């Protein structure tokens, strides 16, 4: 937090001018001059006084002058003071809240689909990039598995996981298999492994195949051995995140040059990068706002990340949020992220 500027500006006048400057810059994206502040601040100050205050704000590092303009723009430190002390957050729009509630209720039986929808809705409502991580610690429990024969020695494995979540995996076997062989393999897995975590099932399959190798026919061993990879892939997918609306960032001039966009899109594609970013707020109490370099990643120096954790049961924690330019409407975005986290948490916990 930046305490120094606050100590130097105990009076409301300078803070009011900074607030107006940031609000106008967020709205218009253009450097703000003293004449605009004089008209919009609501303070009866001479242009000379306003210029003096702006000069002091610049000395404190809260605003800066672009090389090509006589106006001023907020610095990350200015945004931080604005977000922490000067902003008045708006109540989320009723239409947006109803849209979130309706979508979550409609897809409450399909948790992964719900996460996809939440990232898309966050992006749609805020016009930024929406991101949601799958809750950490959430186990993938097998409820049922079925096999269907496909062409070219391929088998479709249909896994029902947790509360009616369905995942399909296409497997390749060493030889074609009949419907009866596939059914026997499915019956074997359903009889012995339903109700266990997929990671544990995969390990048990390896152990059990070694132990029963003498009594199990080759076709059965082939199918079950290949099914191990289906278990592994389904379990691994739980350590992921969902991003939507990355192309919204192209609409902001400060992010729209090719090099910046290439770097941002590359960052979105890197699993570990995004998970590490979200982990920064996984144990936070409510909404967190990372402005510019506060994220810890150089590629996001011109961006802000607004996140909030959500809980499923007591131990499973995920994070959702938005990524956009530092010039975002914090007064609207922060409450939207907050209410979305609480609605998602309520919908997921209603299924437990």
Image (cartoon, helix red, strand yellow):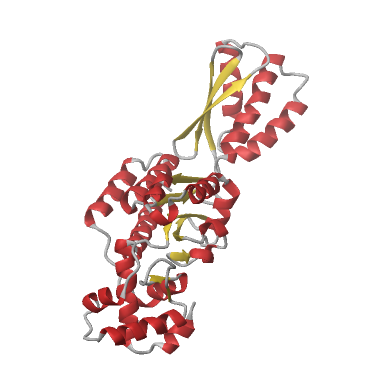
Q: Is residue 270 above or below residue 67?
A: above
Tally of numbered tags: 0
* Residue 196 visible, this orientation: no
Q: Is residue 97 above or below residue 285?
A: above
Depth check, front residue: 150 or 242 = 242
Depth check, front residue: 183 or 61 = 61
Q: Is residue 291 above or below residue 169?
A: below
Q: Is residue 67 above or below residue 181?
A: below
Tell me the quarter of the picture where residue 206 sits.
top right
Task: Where is residue 164? Give x, y as percent.
Answer: 44, 36
Name the side, left or right, on which 278 lies relative to 192. Answer: left
Q: At 25% from the left edge and 51% from the top edge, which residue is drawn?
A: 98
Task: Where is residue 146? Give x, y as percent.
Answer: 53, 23
* Residue 149 visible, this orientation: yes
Task: Where is residue 94? Give x, y as percent.
Answer: 22, 56
Tell me the quarter of the picture where residue 172 sits.
top right
Name the side, left or right, on which 116 lies relative to 267. Answer: left
Q: At 43% from the left edge and 50% from the top edge, which residue is drawn?
A: 256
Task: Where is residue 16? Give x, y as percent.
Answer: 30, 80
Q: At 37% from the left edge and 45% from the top edge, which residue is drawn?
A: 120
């Amino acid at each position: 937090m930046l305490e120094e500027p606050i100590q130097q500006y105990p009076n409301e006048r300078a803070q009011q001018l900074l607030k107006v400057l940031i609000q106008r810059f967020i709205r218009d994206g253009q450097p703000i001059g003293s004449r605009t502040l004089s008209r919009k601040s609501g303070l009866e100050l001479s242009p000379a006084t306003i210029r003096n205050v702006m000069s002091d704000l610049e000395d404190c590092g809260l605003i800066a002058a672009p090389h090509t303009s006589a106006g001023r723009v907020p610095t990350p430190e200015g945004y931080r003071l604005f977000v922490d002390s000067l902003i008045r957050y708006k109540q989320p729009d009723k239409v947006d809240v109803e849209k979130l509630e309706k979508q979550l209720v409609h897809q409450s039986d399909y948790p992964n689909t719900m996460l996809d929808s939440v990232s898309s809705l966050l992006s749609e409502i805020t016009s930024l990039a929406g991101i949601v991580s799958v809750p950490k610690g959430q186990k993938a429990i097998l409820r049922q598995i079925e096999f269907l024969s496909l062409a070219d020695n391929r088998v479709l494995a249909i896994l029902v996981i947790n509360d009616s979540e369905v995942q399909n995996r296409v497997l390749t076997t060493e030889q074609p298999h009949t419907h009866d062989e596939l059914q026997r393999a499915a019956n074997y897995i359903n009889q012995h492994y339903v109700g266990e975590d997929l990671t544990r099932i995969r390990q048990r399959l390896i152990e059990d195949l070694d132990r029963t190798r003498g009594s199990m026919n080759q076709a059965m061993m082939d199918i079950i051995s290949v099914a191990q990879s289906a278990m592994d892939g389904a379990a691994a997918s739980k350590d992921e995140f969902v991003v939507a609306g990355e192309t919204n960032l192209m609409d902001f001039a400060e992010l729209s040059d090719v090099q910046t966009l290439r770097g941002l899109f590359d960052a979105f594609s890197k699993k570990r990068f995004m998970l590490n970013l979200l982990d920064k707020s996984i144990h936070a109490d409510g909404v967190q706002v990372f402005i510019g370099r506060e994220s810890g990643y150089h590629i996001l120096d011109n961006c802000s990340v607004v996140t909030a954790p959500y809980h499923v049961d007591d131990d499973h924690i995920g994070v959702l949020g938005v990524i956009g330019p530092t010039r975002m409407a914090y007064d609207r975005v922060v409450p939207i992220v907050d209410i979305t986290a609480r609605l998602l948490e309520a919908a997921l916990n209603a299924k437990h």
